[in-house]
Every structure is written in C-alpha cells, then in structure tokens.
Image (cartoon, rainbow, N blue to C red):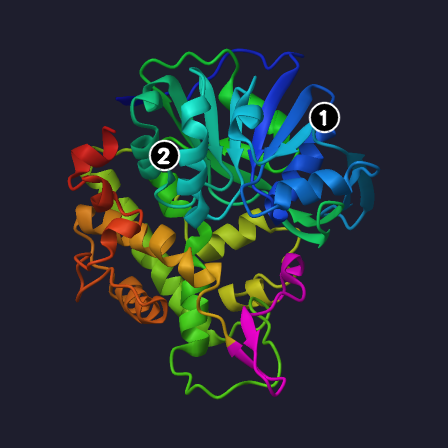
C-alpha cells in the first residue's frame, strides 16, 4: 500500500550522497554532468543500450564531461565534471545508492525496473525525470513488494531543453524551465533519511524550482506528452505519402490547425481534472492548467509572443531549429518517422493514460480519441475501439486499466 506524503521538514544537510542516473541520452548526459559537478554528490550511471557504457567510460578516461549552458538571460558558461562510474552492471550501479533517477524514454522504463529491482535497498527514492503519464502505475507494479519500502516521485517534464553535441563528452543546455511540478508517493514501510523535495532540488540546481503537486494523478494529467501527438496529427493526418524536400520545423512551424488540436486536447484534460476534483470531494487539481497557460508560465523568458498558443510555440527560443522526426528517402527527400518517440512513446505512455483516467472519471474525450485512433494505425497497435480503451494492445500501454485500476477509489488509493 502506498501513501502520500507531501510536507518535508528535515534539512537537506551536507551529507555526501551517491545517486544513480539511468540512461545515456540527452537528458541523462545533462543530469550526469550537472549532478557530478555538485561537491556533495557521487554519481553512478547505468546505461543498458548496447555497448554505450563501455564507449562512454573510454571517452572519459582522459577527458571530463563538458556541459555548455545557455541561461535564460542569454549568458553562457561551461561546466566540467565526471561521473564516478558508468556501467552496464546493475549490481555495481546500484551499490550504495539511495536515489535513482530514470532519465530514459518511457518505453525503456520497464527494462530498467526489471534490471535494478533485485538490487534496490529499502528506503530508496525512485525519480522519473520525467516520469511521464502512468509512471507510478508501472513502477509500483514492477517493484512488487519492494514498492512498500520505496518512495516513487515523478516530475512532469525534463528540466531543460538539451542535446548531445558529442556523445560522452559534450552536452548543451539551451534553456531552463522556470518551475517544474513533482508529486511523490511514499511506501507504507519507507523511511527516507532525507527530504524528497529539497534533495531533488539540490541535484537539479537553482532552476527549475520544484513545485510540489498535491496528488500524483495531477502530475499524470500535467505530462507534456500531450504536445507531440496533436501536432503530428495536425501536420500529417491527411498526408498523401509524398516525400517533402526538407525537414519541417516542429514547434516553430506550428499552424492554426495544429494549435487548435493541441488546445482541444488540453481542454479535455482540464475537464478530466475538474471532474475528478468534484468526484473526489474537492481534491486539489488546480495545478492542471491549460497548455497555453503552461507555456506562458514555464517558458516566460523564452517566449517572445504570448498572444496565442500558436505564437507562443513559434517564438519559443528554447525550440530554435527543432524539426519533425523524419526519415530520408533515396532521392534526398524526407518522410515522417511515425516510430519516433513523439508517437511510439507519447501515445501509449501519454494520451492513452490520460484517456484511461478520463474514462474512469466519465469524461468524454473526442479529440484525444481521434488522435489515438490515427496514431495506433501508424504504430500497428490497437488501444482504442470507438471511444473505449478495449483494444487488444491496451496491456502494453500504461493506462490505469492496464494495472487493474477501474474506479475513482482504486485510482486514488494505490
């Protein structure tokens, strides 16, 4: 049985702490570099992808990991640091660790849960950075009895826009979010020896400021996996298969149709939150806000034109140059890559989860339904049939129904 604990009163203190960062992509590079630069942290890295750990270790034998930072005021700096170990061996990676950060795509969470669970010690904090929708459902299920002795935390998105410039050696931060929502569930037998919020904040640094969310369902509805599928559907929903001459801008190329689709999805998520607050005797869902409001708050220094959702996305400097996921053709043109994480992750571990929560709340979601129905044809999956999550592949998604949760009480009393 997991219980919610929100208020922390213990000071963070100067204790030398060993943390584990799972992953080898953009976010894991970034967090590894930042965390390793903190004097009170030792950083282990676990990456399970092919020979990534071996290659990364070799690259850092005679070099530091460099992070080039562009702050929100346009000033720049460079930070040099180095993790203690980078390994593929979970026993070595988990040894002495009391905080685990999963900084991998949601589809990889299951692999990492399976790998590290045998080695997890009681009173461990597990942090999804980001958790993405359904993180708590899956984590609790895969940890089994060990879930009682752990605290499960989920942040709503990555703290920064970042990218690898040179694998294993150089990563770039393009901008920091101002604040970031986080919820956490504390196992009934878990007694952490450190405060959750302050300690995670210490790892991340001054920005973004962590904002504690009253309940984990709100964070699930706040997940930013709602952004990519509507934009893809708006761009490619009527695509006739003809290759295009160049990769179109993703965010900064948003048109009115795409913005309207995203806004309608956000409206449906908001309606779900409001209905849950009503059904659950006024539980606080106030942190679930419209996506346009989110852009104005979380990217307030990066967005030049806040007159509309479309313009907020088009003028967000954190999105400079980011393009649609595309596959080149033999004649040098491009076709959309529907197997990229914007679809393969953000639908089963995003929209399908939100649809599942809405279904439990009794809220209709026609726009979400339409986008899931389109996306599942691209993924060769079946999650939704009509307006119900009764497709044959629903068990492979992270909807609450996939874990036997079908009522309001079951949803809130994990």
Q: Which residues are magenta?
A: 315-335
Label for residue 284? none
Q: Position of residue 294 (x, y in %)?
A: 49, 51
Residue shown at the point (55%, 72%) measured from the top left? 326
Q: Is residue 204 above or below residue 261?
A: above
Sequence-first tag of 1 and 2: 1
Q: Which residue is mark 2?
A: 139
Q: How many marks?
A: 2
Which quadrant, please, contains the N terminus?
top left
* Image location (x, y in percent) of residue 188: 31, 16
Q: Which type of secondary structure does the marked residue at label 2 adopt?
A: helix
The answer to whether 226 is drawn above or below residue 159 in the figure is below
Q: Residue at x 34, y 13 (%)?
A: 189
Question: Which SS does the magenta portion mostly show?
Answer: loop
Name the foreground residue: 395 vs 257: 395
Closest to the observer, 33 or 49: 49
Magenta stretch contains residue 323: yes
Is 344 a magenta residue?
Answer: no
Dot 2 crowding, Cα within 10 Å, few <14, some 14–19, many 20+: many
Label pair 1/2, CB-CB below 8 angstroms: no
- Quarter of the image where one finds residue 43: top right
Q: Estimate how packed mark 1 is, as few (under 14), some (14 to 19) or many (20 or more) residues with alpha carbons within 10 Å.
A: some
Q: Is residue 331 toward the left or the right of residue 308 in the image?
A: right
Task: Answer yes or no: is residue 72 visible.
Answer: yes
Closer to us: 279 or 174:
174
Residue at the disc numbered 1: 38
Quadrant in which the C terminus is drawn = top left
């Amino acid at each position: 049985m997991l219980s919610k604990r929100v208020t922390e009163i213990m000071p963070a203190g100067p204790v030398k702490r060993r943390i584990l960062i799972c992953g080898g992509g953009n976010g894991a590079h970034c967090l590894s570099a930042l965390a390793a630069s903190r004097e009170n942290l030792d950083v282990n890295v676990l990456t399970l992808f092919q020979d990534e750990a071996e290659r990364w270790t070799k690259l850092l034998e005679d070099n530091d990991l460099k992070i080039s930072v562009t702050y929100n005021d346009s000033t720049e700096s460079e930070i040099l640091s180095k993790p203690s170990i980078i390994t593929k061996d979970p026993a070595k990676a988990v040894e002495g660790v009391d905080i685990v950060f999963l900084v991998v795509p949601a589809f990889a969470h299951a692999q990492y849960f399976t790998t590290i669970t045998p080695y997890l010690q009681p009173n461990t904090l597990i942090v999804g950075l980001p958790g993405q929708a359904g993180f708590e459902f899956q984590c609790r299920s895969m940890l089994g009895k060990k879930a009682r002795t752990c605290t499960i935390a989920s942040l709503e998105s990555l703290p920064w826009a970042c990218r690898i410039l040179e694998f294993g050696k150089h990563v770039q931060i393009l901008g920091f979010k101002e604040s970031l929502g986080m919820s956490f569930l504390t196992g009934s037998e878990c007694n952490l020896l450190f405060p959750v919020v302050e300690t995670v904040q210490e790892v991340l640094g001054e920005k973004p400021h962590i904002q504690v969310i009253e309940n984990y369902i709100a964070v699930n509805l706040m997940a930013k996996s709602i952004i990519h599928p509507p934009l893809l559907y708006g761009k490619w929903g009527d695509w006739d298969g003809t290759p295009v001459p160049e990769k179109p801008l993703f965010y900064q190329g948003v048109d009115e149709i795409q913005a309207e689709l995203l806004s309608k999805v956000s409206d449906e998520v908001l309606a779900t939150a409001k209905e849950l607050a009503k059904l659950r005797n006024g539980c606080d869902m106030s942190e679930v806000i419209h996506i346009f409001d989110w852009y104005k708050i979380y990217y307030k220094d990066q967005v030049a034109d806040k007159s509309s959702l479309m313009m907020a996305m088009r003028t967000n400097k954190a999105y400079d140059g980011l393009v649609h996921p595309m596959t080149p053709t033999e004649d040098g043109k491009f076709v959309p890559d529907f197997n990229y994480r914007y679809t393969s992750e953000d639908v089963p571990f995003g929209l399908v989860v939100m649809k599942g929560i809405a279904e439990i709340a009794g809220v209709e979601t026609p726009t979400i339904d339409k986008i899931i129905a389109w996306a599942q044809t691209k993924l060769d999956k079946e999650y939704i049939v009509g307006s119900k999550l009764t497709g044959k592949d629903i068990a492979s998604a992270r909807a609450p129904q996939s874990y036997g949760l079908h009522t309001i009480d079951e949803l809130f009393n994990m």
